[in-house]
């Protein structure tokens, strides 16, 4: 880590007020800066016209109203002055990613670059006062007896940061404090609650990582071929991406699980998200109500879609399934959309009840070609339906038994689209191949289907009766 030249350090203690928490959508309403150089303090503050509405809850919190910012300069009019005020100084803020992220985004919108050294006082408090349970600004104020002049106003909060700096200086001495600054500015891309040692513990190998918040609540689960690099990319993106900023502000702990390769990581990620339901992941649904359409001919020769529910569904074996849906409502919605797109008769599809020989509603509004009243033959209706559903046909299992896919140093075993487990030696491989504990999962089906048709196609080993099929790649560990 590069050591800072402590004799020439100038600190800008910065706080901003905004119209909200989204740096892309919301805008700055006030900036307060207290500069400390060679023991001397100077002050810069300004209200900013955000050119957007200030929500009522923000007005109540900050006391800044639309009348107060009306007629004040816009950020683009202040940009040169603000940059001059901050240039060459260490940017000090509490939960610095928020303040720095907003100011950086504001400069970016007008084509100006802004890259100061950043010091977060949350991290400084955690480093110097590890016995404190919390390190938010209100706790710091109460713990160290700081004097509040104007809480939730930019200059008032910037002054609290300078007061805290003075407390640290008095408690630990200037040399220890500047040593802490050297350490933290070198780690400025990390969130307030994460240490460099936490990052160093994560291997840069394939696997899944888990972000935890307060009280060990699961925030986010991800996967990568290089976990440490991917975790750091979340934090680098936090300055410009609202979701990543929110994640960085909330994360308190990171855990990880190594896997043999990318395929294993994909499967583990899917399973973990379903089990732990992290608050910041796209929710993945379990397959307990899974269903699909199947075409069956009635005595009149009409192909009718029949809904096959989870209890009777065997996606790896049945070769006349269409769709795969998480519930009946989703399945019916899909069939209705197909009927509308291809002008099929909803009555003949079982989606609408009508008297025999009467036209369906869609025909009355010219959205059905008339199979319900004989204008279109049943044979033609059958062909149109089959053609419409063909794109959504569920592929039956294309092998005669279980397969293994080489994934890094291990082998992942599947049968009839179902995940059976991972093997690290031949004994495990053949034991898994004999398993009949099949639990179909739609997300795993999609992962395996993509793998055997694409990147892992050459890594498939066919396992029949516990033996490697002749002509297949060898199961080497």
Image (spheres, grey):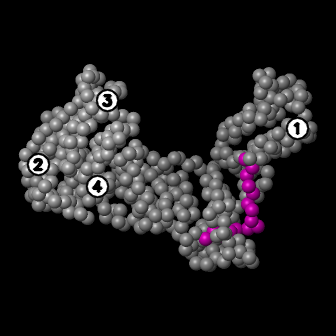
The image shows residue 471 at horizontal and vertical percentages of 74, 76
Question: From mark 1 to mark 2, how far is it between C-alphas?
Answer: 85 Å
Find the distance from the CA under tag 1 to the CA under tag 4.
67 Å
Horizontal side, residue 346 vs residue 41: left or right: right
Residue placed at 79% from the left, 51% from the top? 320
**Disc 4 and disc 3 in contact, CB within 8 angstroms:** no
Q: What element carries label 4?
A: loop
Residue 37: give its label.
2
Q: In which quarter of the image is residue 108?
A: top left
Q: What stretch is highlighted in magenta?
A: 392-406
What crowding class fits label 3: few (fewer than 14 Cα within 10 Å), some (14-19), or many (20 or more)?
A: many
**Circle 4 crowding by C-alpha within 10 Å: few under 14, some 14–19, many from 20:** some
Label 1 sits on residue: 380
Q: Which of marks 4 and 3 is nearer the N terminus?
A: 3
**Is any atom of residue 231 visible in this view?**
yes
* N-terminal-most mark, 1 or 4: 4
Given contact means CB atoms under 8 Å apart, are the residues at marks 3 and 2 in contact?
A: no
Pick whichever of labels 3 and 2 is earlier in the sequence.
Answer: 2
> Could you say where residue 247 lies in the image, as x and y percent from the top left?
39, 48
**Circle 4 residue:** 188
Gap in angstroms between the C-alphas marked 3 and 2? 30 Å
Check if residue 393 falls in the magenta segment. yes
- Give yes or no for residue 160 being in the magenta stretch: no
Circle nearer the viewer, 4 or 2: 2
Number of the front mark, 1 or 3: 3
């Amino acid at each position: 880590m590069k050591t800072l030249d402590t004799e020439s350090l100038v600190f800008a203690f910065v706080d901003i007020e905004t119209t909200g928490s989204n740096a892309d959508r919301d805008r700055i309403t006030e900036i307060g800066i207290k500069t400390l150089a060679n023991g001397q303090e100077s002050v810069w503050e300004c209200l900013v016209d955000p050119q957007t509405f200030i929500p009522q809850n923000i007005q109540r919190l900050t006391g800044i109203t639309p009348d107060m910012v009306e007629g004040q300069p816009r950020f683009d009019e202040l940009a040169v002055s603000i940059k001059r005020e901050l240039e060459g100084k260490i940017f000090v803020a509490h939960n610095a990613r928020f303040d720095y992220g907003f100011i950086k985004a504001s400069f970016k919108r007008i084509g100006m670059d802004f890259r100061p050294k950043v010091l977060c006082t949350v991290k400084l408090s955690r480093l110097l006062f590890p016995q404190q349970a919390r390190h938010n600004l209100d706790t710091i104020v109460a713990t160290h007896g700081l004097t509040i002049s104007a809480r939730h106003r930019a200059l008032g909060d910037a002054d609290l940061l300078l007061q805290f700096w003075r407390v640290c200086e008095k408690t630990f001495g200037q040399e220890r404090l500047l040593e802490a600054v050297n350490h933290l500015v070198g780690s400025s891309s990390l969130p307030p609650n994460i240490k460099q040692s936490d990052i160093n513990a994560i291997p840069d190998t394939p696997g899944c990582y888990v972000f935890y918040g307060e009280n060990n609540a699961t925030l986010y689960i991800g996967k990568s071929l290089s976990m440490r690099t991917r975790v750091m990319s979340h934090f680098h993106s936090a300055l410009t991406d609202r979701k990543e900023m929110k994640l960085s502000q909330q994360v308190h702990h990171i855990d990880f699980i190594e896997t043999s390769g990318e395929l294993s990581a994909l499967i583990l990620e899917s399973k973990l998200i379903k089990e732990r339901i992290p608050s910041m992941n796209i929710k993945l649904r379990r397959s307990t109500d899974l269903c699909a359409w199947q075409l069956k001919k009635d005595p009149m020769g009409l192909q009718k879609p029949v809904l096959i529910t989870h209890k009777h569904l065997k996606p790896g074996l049945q070769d006349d399934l269409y769709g795969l849906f998480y519930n009946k409502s989703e399945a019916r919605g899909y069939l209705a959309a197909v009927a509308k797109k291809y002008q099929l008769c909803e009555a003949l599809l079982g989606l609408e009840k009508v008297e025999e020989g009467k036209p369906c509603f869609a025909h009355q509004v010219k959205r059905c070609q008339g199979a319900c009243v004989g204008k279109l033959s049943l044979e033609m209706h059958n062909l149109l339906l089959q053609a419409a559903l063909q794109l959504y046909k569920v592929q039956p299992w294309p092998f005669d038994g279980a397969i293994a896919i080489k994934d890094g140093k291990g082998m992942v075993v599947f049968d009839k689209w179902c995940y059976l487990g991972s093997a690290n030696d031949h004994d495990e491989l053949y034991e898994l191949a004999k398993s009949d504990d099949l639990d179909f999962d739609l997300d795993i089906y999609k992962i395996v289907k993509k793998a055997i048709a694409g990147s892992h196609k050459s890594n498939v080993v066919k396992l029949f009766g516990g033996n490697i099929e002749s002509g297949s790649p060898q199961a080497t560990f």
